[in-house]
Image (spheres, grey):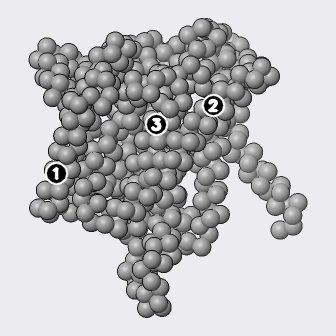
Amino acid sequence: MTKPDQFMFAARRGLVRVAPLILFGLIWHTICTAGVVNKDFLPAPGAVAAALADLFKGGEITKNLTITLFRAAVGLILGAACGIWIGVMMARSRHFREYVTPIVGGTYSLPKSALIPLFALWFGIGNITSIAAVFLACLLPMIVNTYHGVVTTPKVLVWSAEALGTGERELWPRIFIRNALPDIFTGLRIALGFSFVLAISAEMIASTNGIGKLIFMYGENGAYDYMFAAIACMVIVAFLADRALVILTKRLLVWHESAAAELEARRP
Amino acid sequence: MNPIEVRTDAFAWRSAVSILLFIALWEIAARIQVTPVILLPPFSIVAAQLWYSTLDGTLAADLSLSLARAFCGLMLATVGGVVLGLLMARNRTIEWLVDPLVALGFPSPKIAFIPIFILWFGIESLSKILLVTFACVFPIIIGTYSAARAVSRQFVWSAVSLGSSRSGVFFHVILPACYPRIFTTFRIAVPVGLITTFTAEMVAGGGGMGATLIYSQRFFESPTVFAYIVVMLAVGLAVDAAMRRFQSRFLRWAEE
């Protein structure tokens, strides 16, 4: 195929995929204009779009979104770093694993948002509470996935590396961590989802700013078109972040034959 | 994929030491008042509070309300998700129609929708149940869909050549072949359902574990806050253990 052909093909495929969303928007629009439901309960898509534009112009969205994304990102990065470290340590040392496993296993199934009131008690209202909640939520999937990835390293790889003269120290970055990378990225994708949920929950429960607070405030004030606009904005941001991570993963793990298949299969 | 693995005596022993050490450290830190008691009540006081809450029935009432909401939401999500997932796998038009919505809905932080659910369905149980359904339905749709797509063609062909009807193939081949994967995604959805219930109660009130937790925090009744968190942790563990037992008992025939 020539370049323009490829472009047309991709464009048509994109259009076919987006068409149901447009259809959905049209149905939404018709329901609103036909007056089936009260306009206060379901603002028309046009009104929501206008509200969104207004929010961008006034800077409310950009300001609060930056705050939320900052909290989510800091918690995610800290959680990922510590999680990878703990996961590797668990795989390296049997004793460490035996002491840590009950705590990891116990907190793994704890609803992390239950700790938000506790953090609010300890750290007050604001950044630290949100970041701590995001951190803890991201930490556990990272630990579990990193550990799983390291432990499942095929013995053949380790033996080959050793036979070719790789030392014990070099074995870790070269074999174990590299073998765990697909799992680490799977964990990262789960953690990314958690980071948004926890950041927004923490803002709704204990914060004076951020997009979660903004959504809740508009809801309480009855500015429903603005509330829908802020939620739509959050959905789009979360979708784009998830897509970006998937694309990054595929780029970084091209050398790993099962990377793409694994990612699709692991989609829960 | 839980980190729990082969248990030996030494392992169980060290695990017990680890948990006891944690409780002891907590108790000592609280008793020598590293922080004010209001921020960290000693474990013994939390345990006593847990006992009182159990005795006067508030805990049982909150817990049963929360669990009932989570359960209803999960059931709706499972039925809806399985039906939609199977339909998507069997019918290209439905697949075309639903797939973009699922792709957009799956990564979105569902808790952000809670004001909409309050607006539409009120502050009581219904809004929470439906929010749980909304939060859990996407992973179940995706899991069922990929399970149904992965059913071996040979099974289907064999059934057809042995004279199965269309509905026979569906109910006796495709659906049973999907059970293990559906259950795996259900195991993923259950913690999501619990988290969503608790968080929704915290944000919107209306009774339940989350609402009591947040009220206790507002009145600085720290022992109650800690006691409720301990209960939530226990619930999470118990539910996960129960599902693991169910899986190893009834779905043993399926390879992981």
Question: Residue A257, image x and y in percent?
Answer: 55, 73
Residue B30 visible in rendering: yes
Q: CB under 8 Å between callouts 2 and 1? A: no
Secondary element at tag 3: helix
B102 up-or-down from B165: above or below: above
- Horizontal side, residue A97 vs residue A1: left or right: left
Question: Residue A77, image x and y in percent?
Answer: 54, 48
Label 1 marks which chain's residue?
B
| Residue wearing tag 1 | B17
Question: Residue A51, image x and y in percent?
Answer: 73, 18
A52 up-or-down from B121: above or below: below
Q: Amino acid at mark 2?
A: Ile
Dot 1: few (<14), some (14–19), or many (≥20) neighbours within 10 Å?
some
Q: Amino acid at mark 1?
A: Val
| Residue wearing tag 3 | A132
Residue in view at x 31 percent, y 23 percent: B36
Discs 3 and 1 carry the same chain letter = no
What separation in Å lies between label 3 and label 2 (alpha carbons)? 15 Å
Secondary element at tag 1: helix
Label 2 marks which chain's residue?
A
Instruction: Identify the mark nearer the N-term, 3 or 2.
Output: 2
What separation in Å lies between label 3 and label 1 (alpha carbons)? 27 Å
The picture quadrant where one finds residue A232 is top right
Residue B94 visible in rendering: no
- Horizontal side, residue B234 vs residue B120: left or right: left
Which marked residue is nearer to the observer: mark 2 or mark 1?
Answer: 1
Residue in view at x 40 percent, y 73 percent: A153
Label 3 marks which chain's residue?
A
Q: Where does the C terminus of chain B fall, quadrant-wise?
A: bottom left
- Choose between A75 and A215: the one closer to the eye: A75
Dot 2: few (<14), some (14–19), or many (≥20) neighbours within 10 Å?
some
